[in-house]
Image (cartoon, grey):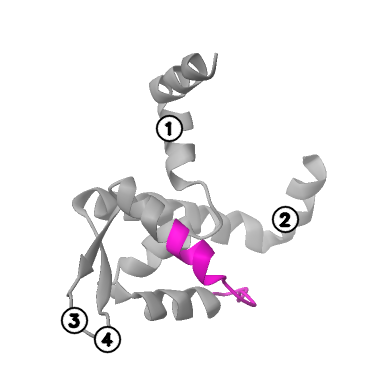
Amino acid sequence: MGQAKSTLTCRCPVAAFQKMISGKYKLRIVWDLKDGPRRYGEIRTGLLRGQDGTSEIAPRVLSRELKALTESGLIDRKDYGVVPPKVEYRLTRKGKSFVPVIGAIRNWGSRHLAQGNVVEMVAAE
């Protein structure tokens, strides 16, 4: 039964998309990388200074999100093989094609969530 479910998920583009970007930080990481390659610490700092600000991001969580984005083909990890370690993350072509989608989500949020509709939307759920 588990295999049938995963087969159905793969056939639905919306479900496949949702699975690919699920996670607390993935959209924000891709959005941050739109401006160019970033190192792990820069990504972490970028997430911490977000509009709402995040009190703390566990290194394990951030590493897991970066690994998942790499496996999905949205970002590329470049290890320079030096000591101390230098690793950069950058968007792939697939990741760059995703930036306008996040931009549209951001614009929608700016229009609708800034109008005080957040309470209405949460109450409707």
Res. 36 visible in picture? no
Image vertical order of residue 122 relative to residue 78, above or below: above
The percent position of residue 115, horizontal first and vertical second, equals 68, 60
Which residue was labeled with disc 1? 16
| Residue that appears at 53% across and 52% down | 23
Residue type of the residue flagged with mark 3 = Val
**Which mark lies nearer to you, 1 or 3?**
3
Which residue was labeled with disc 2? 118
Residue type of the residue flagged with mark 4 = Pro
Badge 4 element: loop
Image vertical order of residue 34 relative to residue 111, above or below: below
Image vertical order of residue 3 relative to residue 20, above or below: above
Quadrant in which residue 34 is drawn: bottom left
The percent position of residue 120, horizontal first and vertical second, equals 78, 49
Disc 2 and disc 3: Cα gap in Å?
A: 47 Å
Ranked by sequence position, the earlier of labels 1 and 2 is: 1
